Image (tube, rainbow, N blue to C red):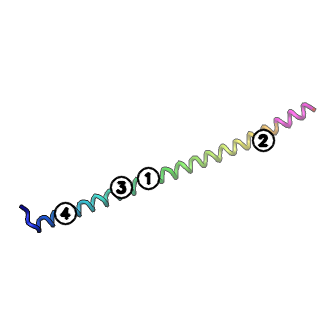
Amino acid sequence: MLDSNTTYLLLAMAGFVFAAVVLVHGHNCNDTIKRKSNQVHNITEQLGKKIDVLEREVVDLQTKIDEVDDQINSLEE
């Protein structure tokens, strides 16, 4: 049978191993969170740029529609 010193030593070693596993897991999770956060930020920027382009196209199309409406109105008169 193991004496009490050996048991305490094994418990201490198990505690250190558990603490190391928790720390490594925490670092991995933080890295994953940072990576995903950067991906979301990049996609948000890309979508913002696409929205700006589409809004400009909408304004251009609205201007063209107004011009066509004016031409139709002038032809009707």
* Residue occupied by mark 1: 35
User: SS class of the residue under badge 3?
Assistant: helix
**Type of amino acid under label 3:** Asn
**Type of amino acid under label 2:** Thr
User: SS class of the residue under badge 1?
Assistant: helix
User: SS class of the residue under badge 4?
Assistant: helix
Percent x, y for residue 3?
8, 66
Determine whether 34 is above or below 6 in the image: above
* Residue occupied by mark 4: 13
Quadrant of the frame with the C terminus? top right
Going from N to C along the chain, the mark reached first, 2 or 3, is 3
Toward which corner of the image does residue 2 lie, by quadrant? bottom left
Label 1, label 2: how far apart the Cα atoms are = 42 Å
**Left-right relation of 9 to 45:** left
Q: Residue at x 78, y 37 (%)?
A: 65
Going from N to C along the chain, the mark reached first, 1 or 4, is 4
Quick one: 56 or 40, which is closer to the camera? 40
**Left-right relation of 49 to 27:** right
Magenta stretch in the rendered image: 68-76
* Residue occupied by mark 2: 63
Q: Is residue 74 magenta?
A: yes
Q: Residue at x 86, y 33 (%)?
A: 72
Q: Residue furthest right?
A: 77
Going from N to C along the chain, the mark reached first, 1 or 2, is 1
